[in-house]
Amino acid sequence: MVGPNRLPSLPDDWLDRECIIPFSFEGKGYQGFAGDTIASALAANGVWVLSRSFKYHRPRGVLTMAGEDTNALVQLDGEPNVPADRRLIEPGLRIQGQNCIGSLKRDWASLLGYFGRFLPPGFYYKAFFKPRGAFAFWEPIIRRMAGLGQIDLHAPHDYHDKAYGFSDVAVVGGGPAGMAAALEAAKAGAEVILIEDGRQLGGSLNFGRYGTDRAAAVNLRHELVATVEASPNITVFTDAVCQALFADNWLPVIQGNRLHKIRTTSVIIATGALEQHIIFRNNDLPGIMMGSAAQRLIHLYGVRPGKRAVIATTNSSGYGVCLDLIENGVEVVAIIDLRDDPPDCPLSSTARAKNIRVISGHTIVEAKARMGNRHVSSIAIARGQGPHQETDPVQRLDCDLVCMCGGYVPAAGLLRHAGADIAYDEETAAFVVTPLIDPIHAAGAVNGVSGLEALTADGRHAGWQAARDGGFEVDARPARPTTDPAGTRPVLLPVTPHPKGKDFVDYDEDLQACDIVNTVADGYTNVELLKRYSTVGMGPSQGRHSALPTVRLAAGALGCSLDDIGLTTARPPVGPITFAQLAGRQFEPVRRTAMHHRHLEKGATMMLAGPWLRPAFYGPEADKETCIREETIAVRNNVGIIDVSTLGGLEVRGSDAAEFMNRIYTFSYTKQLDGRGRYVLMTDETGAIVDDGIAARFHERHFYVTATTGAVDAVYRNMLWHNAQWQLDVDITNVTAAYCGINIAGPNARAVLSPLCEDVDLSVEAFPYMAATEGMVAGIPARILRVGFVGELGYELHAPANCGEALWDALLEAGRDHDIRPFGVEAQRVLRLEKGHIIIGQDTDGLTHPFEAGMGWAIGKKKKDFLGKRAIEIRKKRGTTRQLVGFTLTDGKELPPAEGHIVVRGPDIVGHVTSAASSHTLGKVVGLAYVAPDQQEPGTRLTIKAEGGRIIDAEVVALPFYDPENKRQEL
Amino acid sequence: MADTESSPTPESFLKRSPLYRALRSRGARFMETEGGAVADSFGNGDESENLAVREMAICDLSPLPRHGFKGKGALEWLRKQGVAIGNEDNRAYTQPGGSLVARLAPTEALILGNLSSENALSAQLEGDWSIDTAPDCYAVPRNSANFWFLITGLHAPNMFAKLCGIDLRLHKFPVNAIAQTSVARSVAIIIRADLGAVPAFHLLGDSASALYMLDCLEDAMGEFGGKPVGISAVRRAMKS
Amino acid sequence: MKIMLCPLNGPRNISEFVCRGDVVDRPDPTACSDEAWADYVFMQDNVAGIVREWWYHVATAYWFIAERNTVTDEIVRTYPASEIFHPPVDHGTDSGGRS
């Protein structure tokens, strides 16, 4: 037998006793069975302390055995905060306790517990923020003391991904109600996804008592599971946590390393209920656990939870726990029933018949431990409960196990995401979830139902409703369960804090009953403020156990009802999620031009331009400056080619094409001739420049318009939006990806290109500056535009993208004798700057209007309207406040300023640099900057303040810097 | 099986698939089609590719012809050319010659060439269209704008579920259904067009994102044993 | 995630769409006051209740109109823009035609 606390094999436990697994905890070796969780394997070996608490570093152990608490969080190699009561042991697994300084056994920080009265709620706010700056000193110390586990920054990356899922009905919770609901919906023909967070279907049937003989629950589980497994239209997800219920029935379900995004027509929430703890001094000692935790240890893991047990209960379930304990060799010293006059029920009658001592009308007031608070050794009880509670103990009972059966709270987080609320009905002593709106339904314990018959009946009813919502033909509506077995419901009375404290309300945050009372006394009576000030419910267990006692304490302190206090807002996620699960597999589209591999073969350093990869320059990063310089020289003196495939391309076609162009762009296009290009500048309705490009007219009804790489999608969307209102006879198509683009530029451009053109005469007479035509280039159909962005003789070729590589090769081959050279984005930026051409988005911002940018020439004066016309007029009338100008540096040896460096005049900032570069061609630094309107005259001296306060003297010069008469581009 | 020596190289054609390098690095052998080279097989034997087609496979059809027409007179002009187009949007209509015409909107259609033979319809439409002869009907260069993959096999719907939010399960997304949507965050068109009894989906998207999409698809296919196959395996599946 | 009902493509995850805000009347730029123009380009009414909004399905480059309740986030109705916008009888922003 592995471990001294191991019980003989049970037929339905989750262990494979043939397979023994070695692991270590805190450096010491242990053995467990396959199927054991870390916590169950340790418990079987008599190890009960799993971690230290957050604030007082108190030893903590098994509380729920369901992964619902912080006590059981442990550290693995490379993974903190692992729930020891859910994670299975594996061979060689190395486990450490969390939150200790020293070792789990001797944590020096536990001395903090003695100073607990100096650590009230709001302590951090009150203590560490004065004098100013003090928190910077305290913060690292506090963080070290308060952390939850250690992150290993070198832990290996794991593969996580996401997948969509679809169903007619999704059922969350695979207990009796969930399974019954799934079966009923499937019977009507619905496709059902059944989501269970445990290892196997069954929910509380796996461990719960339900009747005087547990066999009824076991048999029901077998029957339901077998029927579910035989249903072809039910898909079962186990070990899967539904983290939220989002709009339109969208469920994020985490299973292993995958996040399933399930869309369903209707939803049934059958998430059950959470057993609650009982508030008494030292209620956190290891050995004190939920009654259901003891049942899980016994039935799922074959672990005897103790030798001598005391059960404290507010309802009939404590009697069921009692029967489970005595049947498995645990002596039950007494059942402390907090109710004054507990009603008889089959469970309590059976327990009494076995001569179990029942002490009603009493409560536990204190637990005591052996040295070091490492395990409970006795409890003290006193008369009464709530306002009538006496704190003087009447009796002490020795024990090594205390089972707390404080009643159940619906696990209604998902329902509350959908807008439902939980209210406590004092008359029936039941929780009611309300209101629910179709197609969201609740079934089973979350719906306040208990008892096997009632749970399955409620499930069938919900399944019927869900199938009906999905439009499936359904039989007669199943009956809803009416009454519950007597005595199952808890009676909730206010809680009385113990005078000496350590009566924990919130185990995560080490909050005691008095902390809640004091927070209310500090004035935080609203439950949301109470939570944030005291931090109650803010730990990993998210108020699963602390919410109810908090409300009871606050209601007691304020003398009002539980509903007057209410609950804090429930938000996703329901349980902890790792960042990896959220990040998952990220999709970040990368766009490559047809010539991409040619650039790589040439050794280009690539850069991202939006989603596109573009060559920055051809050569390694180390040679950046040389490469850029040589590429600019090639274009100015010889010939270069650049891949401009990323430029946007839009077809504007239809009888209203010219009218549409007129309304969208600032120029006039009505009289533009076929076979000619014209500059386009787009402003929005605030008058700000948003895009520019070239429009080539190929037909009276056809313009081909370029847009900037980054803006084309927005420009296209904008054009369509405007025309959705104008309803002009025009069709707009985004053909960006369909065309590759190559710009060939330099004095030898014509010499290289001409031999490739079979049917186009490139002579200056036949094909002058701004001409546009369609023709064959190297056997490839191409649109040829004569443009001059870099200020040299140049042609832009737009050809089908699938021919891009062949066209690029043909041009390089044709230019080989001319030493043609490809150039990248960096060289192009220098070349266009030398010509004073602006880049939208770099030299303009979200406010720049055409007159500020010196582009008043691009506005059609006679046009009645275009998008930005009215706003530009208004802004011009109000007077410009800045002007974009060209500048050079006075000192030839000064390094260029960078984009964003400010232009100052005395104490004022009057503008900033938008572009600057050292021009090899011009032998000086040139740039563009915004300056005050009265500084725009050439010759004006400017002061630029650069990095580290460096002052640069500059002078305004007329644009363009290079070839002011534009002779070269018109060669 | 094609002889490596005699199979053409994609670089010997002006028109090239954006993926020819990627396919070659995975062992593709090419054959000439429509003025380009399409992957014919991957050299692992017919049976292996036949099985992949049935289970989970991707075939690059980018070198095959396809054409788009758009504008308020587009469908009318196509009908005048003898193209059969029904009245439902987002539905594909099979033509007598084997081409598939996808009605994308009341103002737009996409014509996918026949996978198994010469494409008379494509050539005819391409030849007949001009801005002067086709009123309110405008050509869309789908050949170069889009990559064209065929995703085949029983696992295709589950594979797509990892990339796309549309329910493509076979009983929910019938033959000839079309979804214009986002696949791996990139705009795409999905058309169900089974190969006999084998589920198959055309996937067309941004040609500049072809390599990105291939990476995403191969990653998503991994758990289903998916792999690239040549067009011969697809043609065999059409016949059987 | 919410579902948006696209008049062309049917119900889709709302992440496939872009919203462009309320459908508003553009004042006549040649006749309105500066204040009226500024109000048009910069101000939103921020109505609590049912509003008419522009929505765009990215994959099909399709603009349509959705009526949405800003209080409940319920999408009441969606329809093509041509339901309320019609081709112009007279258009021409330029002083003269080409031919």
Image (cartoon, coloured by chain):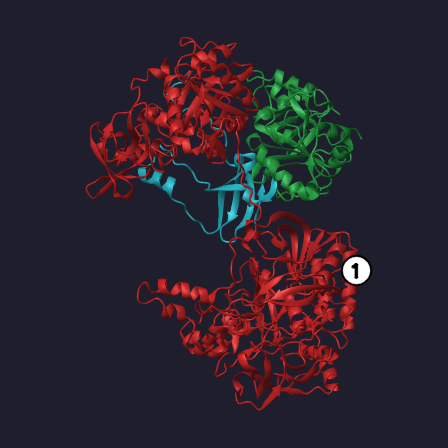
Chain colours: A red, B green, C cyan
- Camera-side residue: A188 or A629? A629
Residue at 79% across, 59% down: A227
- Camera-side residue: A274 or A961? A961
- Camera-side residue: A353 or B108? A353
**Percent x, y of residue A172:** 66, 59
Q: Would residue B210 appear left or right of A14 to someone viewing this image?
A: left
Residue A732: tell me if it is visible. no
**Percent x, y of residue C32:** 34, 36
Are there few (<14), some (14-19), or many (20+) residues within 10 Å of tag 1? Answer: few
Residue at 57% across, 91% down: A394
Q: Report the number of numbered marks.
A: 1
Q: Which residue is mark 1?
A: A226
Query: What kind of residue is marked 1?
Result: Ala
Seen as rendered, the residue at the extreme bottom is A394
Q: Above or below — where is A355 with respect to B66? A: below
| Quadrant occupied by the C terminus of chain A | top left
Q: For residue A771, which quarter of the picture?
A: top left
Q: Would residue B9 appear left or right of B235 to someone viewing this image?
A: left
Residue A139: tell me if it is visible. yes
Chain of the residue displaying label 1: A
Task: Tell me the element at label 1.
Answer: helix
**Percent x, y of residue A91:** 67, 60
**Percent x, y of residue A377:** 60, 83
Q: Would residue A780 appear left or right of A237 to someone viewing this image?
A: left
Q: Above or below — where is A30 with respect to B148? A: below
| Quadrant occupied by the N terminus of chain A | bottom right
